[in-house]
Amino acid sequence: MILSGNEIEKAVAAGKIVIDPFDPARLGPNSYDFSLGNRCKTYTSPELDARLHNETVEREIGDDGLMISPSRLFLVNTHERMGSTHYVPIIRGRSSTGRLGLFIDITADLIDIGSINQWTLQLHSIIPIRIYPGMVIGQVTFWVVKGEIAPYRGKYGDLRSPVGSLSHLDFSQGEDSNSALVDG
Amino acid sequence: MILSGQEIAAARQRGEIEIEPFYTAQLNPNSYDFCLAPKIIEISPKADQPVEIDVDPNGHLLLPGRLYLGCTSEVIGSANYATTLLGRSSIGRLGLFLNITADLGHCGATSQWTLEMTVVQPLRIYAGMRIGQVAFWMQLGKPTSYSGRYHRDLGPQLNRDRPLSAGLSDDSQRQ
């Protein structure tokens, strides 16, 4: 089951969902519109390797925005700190940004329950597009869970800046030694 | 409702979900991490035919502008729950798409799932790496079992629709 906008508002008031800052005007019938933060990470090398630590460089996005070119990946934080220990968040773009050819995640729309922070968006554009901090860029939905919940205790903690991939840790830890629940 | 990780494990014990092989370490709060099988198919506008590739231990470099069909190491499916396939945030952060807006699995289809992979920047991948995840969903109503053409598939599978050109010629004959 997906939560209605009214139910999202109630869950925020009850502390079951974190959306900070929260503006009731951003509630949709079944989602909440979130906005773009102002910190962006890009990889220093054009060629990436899933087994290696890929160096990133961070920059602040000014009021004049940032041009998203199709050939590069841009990791940008959400302005809001979000998450839930009760419901599973799933993010998606808005039709307004989709119509501009902008992906806000790369087939990684499911947020682990208990992961509460400024999420890292994976921005990729089909055609060049300029984006601005604070613009409404995506929406988050919340889903009811069946079964006992073991919240997220993974490798991406309570973070405010966008974070590059930590996939290399999968390799260094080995496939069978991850006793903790590791996130996506 | 989406199943919690513990509920995925319990449903597998009850025989309602198939994931083989299965390791509890690959359970997430609401999903299960699957791994990449070693054989992939590259489809490039520069080549006439799809090319089969065995990903060697030093990995394989995926290039933008091409489509790669991989598959899960695991056989995955459920006759009781709807299944969605998604990437992991660690992999999304590297710019690797795992499906092309086709994330819904059919209830009752059990297979090594074909992954539709494409990259934003060149990316080296490895066989056996934890590349994506599956989530399981309760459904409302009596399950309708899948009897389609991709059931029990092993290995990455090319599209099995009739080629577009053949479909067009059929239409012209009808006219």
Image: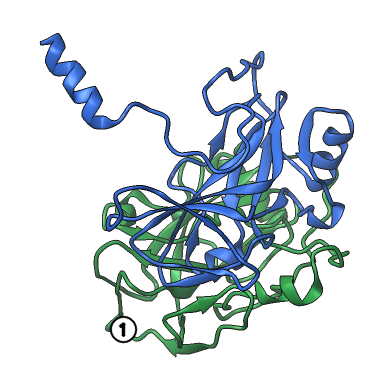
Chain colours: A green, B blue
Q: Amino acid at mark 1?
A: Asp
**Residue farthest to the left?**
B175
| Picture layout, residue B52 above or below residue B149 | below
* Residue B158 picture quarter: top left
SS assignment at label 1: loop
Q: In the rendered view, does A137 fall on the left or right side of A121?
A: left
Percent x, y of residue A178: 84, 66
Q: In the rendered view, does A76 fall on the left or right side of A181?
A: left
* Residue B74 picture quarter: top right
Percent x, y of residue A73: 42, 73
Q: In the rendered view, does A101 fall on the left or right side of A133?
A: left
Percent x, y of residue A2: 60, 38
**Which residue is nearer to you in this view: A173 or A1?**
A173
Alpha-carbon neighbours of circle 1 within 10 Å: few (<14), some, or many (≥20)?
few
Chain identity of mark 1: A
| Picture layout, residue A72 above or below residue B99 | below
Residue at 14%, 13% in the rendered image: B173
Residue at 79%, 64% in the rendered image: A175
**Which residue is nearer to you in this view: A54 or A65?**
A54
Q: Quadrant of the N terminus of chain A?
A: top right
Q: How many marks?
A: 1
Residue at 84%, 57% in the rendered image: B25
Answer yes or no: is residue A147 visible: no
> Which residue position holds label 1?
A63
Percent x, y of residue B139: 65, 25
